Image (cartoon, helix red, strand yellow):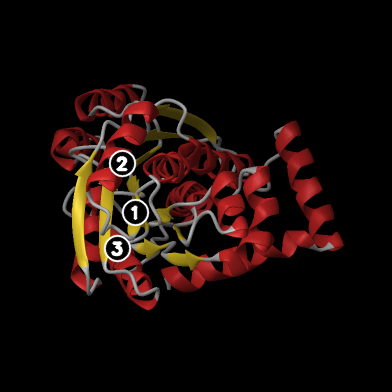
Amino acid sequence: MGIALAGALSVSLAGCSSTGGKRAEDARKAASAQGKAAVNTPRWTFAMITHSGDGDSFWDIVQSGAEQAAVKDNINFLYSQDDEGQQQAQLVNAAIDKKVDGIIVTLAKPAAMKSALARAQKAGIPVITVNSGSEESKKFGALTHIGQDETIAGEAVGEELNERGREQAICVLHEQGNVGHEQRCDGVEKTFDGKIQRLYVNGTSMPDVQSAIEAKLQTDKSVDAVVTLGAPYADTAVKAKQGAGSKAEIDTFDLNAKVAAGLGDGTLGFAVDQQPYLQGYEAVDLLWLYKYNADVLGGGRPVLTGPQIITKDDAAELADYTRRGTR
């Protein structure tokens, strides 16, 4: 059910490339600017608390989708983030203290979030988890989880590397302690016929990331594929490849304008899109549906928004969407 819904919404977004679609998009933007809701339900307050660090373009897209749905659903939307688990939990507790009507939260570091979500459940506040934490979501009392299964996404990457004839890959982890990142590399290792090594880097410093990848490529000339776990790190990996004089293919999880351009000019091999705009949009929409009609989507299983393998053939079509910040 979740996959079908994600696909249907993806098709509707793709339709914006036509003249009629552009008029509809402009109308939505005008409605958003004027704060006009499409429903007459009470003005509930929903809080989204993520594990994003500052300046992460991926989470800008998630937030954009959530804000668009909030306008439509007459929701007062609050957004906050912290990449440290304990601080993120404090933000959840602050939202509970404000007596919000619903909470959307990521579980990149689930152990730190468990008690805060138990408190939300005790307070009767419905919770939807998004992006990370699909395995813990139900155990922590959430209505459903929206995102991609990270292990399945990793498996898709391993299979794609096989099709491309790669034999030696490195999986670059930029956030230690993030269970979703480990699951991605686990998935790659499960299906990849070649050898994969994990490279832990300091994701808060792009110069450090570049130097670490470059050093690895200089010392191990057998590496023919570098897999980064976030779109902003793909461009840095390209620079590291150039500095090392390596011929390794650079591939990445997630999509942004630079990644789309890199796919188009062949700088990047492929990307794995999990549709972050859809994650934010559906999280708000499903909380609204639960408050309005006691609806729960997914039947106890995660609502999947990915993975989708994106290659050079798809880059041109997605370029407009990445520039406007919805893909």
Q: Residue at x 63, y 68 (%)?
A: 11
Secondary structure of residue under mark 3:
helix
Q: Residue at x 61, y 51 (%)?
A: 261
Nearer the observer, disc 1 or disc 3?
Answer: 1
Which amino acid type is shown beneath numbered disc 3? Answer: Gly
**Do callouts 1 and 2 mark residues in contact (Cβ within 8 Å)?**
yes
Per the image, the residue denoted by label 1 is: 226
Can you see residue 229? yes
Q: Earlier in the sequence, mark 1 or mark 2?
A: 2
Crowd class of label 3 (few under 14; some 14 to 19; many from 20; radius 10 Å): many
| Total marks in image | 3
Residue 155 position in % (x across, y down): 28, 69
Which amino acid type is shown beneath numbered disc 1? Answer: Val
- Separation of marks 2 and 3 at Cα, in angstroms: 20 Å
Secondary structure of residue under mark 1:
strand
Q: Is residue 25 above or below residue 312?
A: above
Residue 25 position in % (x across, y down): 76, 51
> Which of 114 and 35 lies nearest the eye of the viewer?
114
Per the image, the residue denoted by label 2 is: 213
Which amino acid type is shown beneath numbered disc 2? Answer: Ile
Crowd class of label 2 (few under 14; some 14 to 19; many from 20; radius 10 Å): many
* Image mark for residue 21: none
Q: Is residue 231 above or below residue 224?
A: above
Per the image, the residue denoted by label 3 is: 154
Q: Earlier in the sequence, mark 1 or mark 3?
A: 3
Residue 306 position in % (x across, y down): 42, 63
Outermost residue, bottom side: 163
Quarter of the rendering containing residue 93: top left
Crowd class of label 1 (few under 14; some 14 to 19; many from 20; radius 10 Å): many
Can you see residue 174? no
- Separation of marks 1 and 2 at Cα, in angstroms: 9 Å
